[in-house]
Amino acid sequence: MSNSLSIVILAAGKGSRMKSPKAKVLHEICGREMLYYSIKAAREITDDVIVVVAHQKDAVIAAMEKHFDNLTFVTQDAENFPGTGGAMMGVYPKYDDVLVLNGDMPLIQRSSIEKFLANPADIVMSVIPLDNPSGYGRVVIENDRVQRIVEEKDASESEKAINTVNAGVYAFKHHVLQTYIPKLSNANAQGEYYLTDVIEMARNDALSISPLYVEEVEFKGVNSKNDLTNAEMIMMDRLRRSWMDAGMIMQLPETIYLEEGVKFEGECIVENGVRLCGNTLISHSHIKAHSVIEDSTVKNSDVGPLAHLRPLSVLEDTHVGNFVEVKKSHLTGVKAGHLSYLGDATIAEGTNIGAGTITCNYDGVKKYQTIIGKNVFVGSDTQLVAPVEIADNVMIAAGTTVTAGKYESDILILSRTPIRKVAGFFTKFFGKGK
């Protein structure tokens, strides 16, 4: 971690092109707000991370404080000092080198940030060569030094032929910001204070300004829902590759949805069409096709196909088969082969859950617990009306409704309506010709 670099992340904008009431930097990629990724990369390098906020600032601050400690938040006076230059006016970096990032660049990585530190120039400016630079300001470079930035509407024909554009990330020596930020003016068509004007003033004073050529995939901002989707695909591919490199097996990985908070231990197998969300841990387990797991823990178990673990579920040494839904339950050494709902339950080892079993855990107002002991055989089409507690070594007959209460060990629980037979009913009902 650097003890000489401060990183400022600009996260004050509305992001009108997202066409959403939500602040742009709070839109999620792989289960995390896009601002999270910029901060994560920054925190890998320095302890001085400053986030500039304005639009929906309380929501932005609250979201980031769930993930990070010891961030510095600065509120931009966007009404009186709008623009990227205005965002820097209340910023007081701790160190001599200051890197300015954008909160809508979730794909940037530590290795790319570190390249700015290797250049001793007064200003290091990121630039991207584009095949089609139309719509972008051009960066005029001579003798490996930035001469000026020309907006497209102001560019000559020769300048429009330049394909090098501004990527929007800068490294400044602190004295540069101290000198030129107070000199910024908003005497322009937009009435904003632009950080790019610092480049022009520094060039006029013969300061050294070096271009740093960067990859578009990391430095391109997310400005629309289409950009958001494209960024998520790239991020998810990184996550998949990282975990496969660590030893897990993915079948048809491009069909597997994976979020940032998901972790794997040991050699796991994840089949096609699986969706893994939130802070999920998969340890030495097999997740079969088209299963969904949310904020849950699976250890030494197999899940699916077509199973659903809802948040706060824990499976250990357990088999959960197709069309089984588990919610906020702890299953240890359990077999639940198919077609069951197990919610707010604790079930011990050796217990078998028959098809069609459900825990009736909700009365319309409150949720209640179901506790099932060891070696309980639950027959098919059983309803367990919580709160209910079943001791070890119990058999529950198929079709039984187990009402609330406590049930002792070594019993059969049976609640069936006696069969009634009505002679001649079929013929009476359908007629002789049926």
Image (cartoon, rainbow, N blue to C red):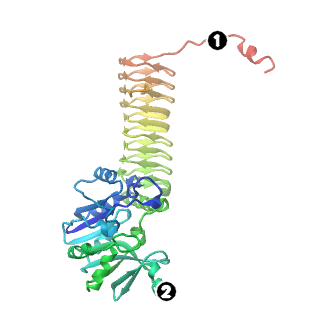
The residue lying furthest to the bottom in this view is 143
For mark 2, does the 10 Å Cα neighbourhood hold few (<14), some (14 to 19), or many (20 or more) residues?
few
Whether residue 257 sits left or right of residue 1 in the image: it is: right
Do we see residue 332 in this rendering? no
Q: Residue at x 46, y 40 (%)?
A: 308
Do we see residue 190 in this rendering? yes
Q: Is residue 265 above or below residue 224?
A: above
SS class, disc 1: loop
The residue lying furthest to the right in this view is 433
Q: Residue at x 41, y 44 (%)?
A: 294
Image coordinates for residue 224, horizontal then vertical, percent:
47, 61
Instruction: Tell me the amino acid under the disc marked 2.
Output: Glu
Q: Total of numbered circles in the picture?
A: 2
Nearest the viewer among 101 and 393 is 101
Image coordinates for residue 363, horizontal then vertical, percent:
43, 25
Q: Is residue 348 above or below residue 253?
A: above
- Write down the quadrant of residue 6 in the picture: bottom left
Q: CA distance from mark 1 to mark 2?
A: 95 Å
Q: Residue at x 50, y 22 (%)?
A: 398
Nearest the viewer among 278 and 332 is 278
Instruction: Tell me the amino acid under the disc marked 1.
Output: Lys
Quarter of the figure with the N terminus: bottom left
Q: Is residue 203 above or below residue 192?
A: below
Image coordinates for residue 240, horizontal then vertical, percent:
42, 58
Q: Which residue is mark 1?
A: 421
Image coordinates for residue 30, horizontal then vertical, percent:
41, 54
Q: Earlier in the sequence, mark 1 or mark 2?
A: 2
- Write down the quadrant of residue 326 in the picture: top left
* Picture disc at residue 157: 2
Nearest the viewer among 251 and 86 is 86
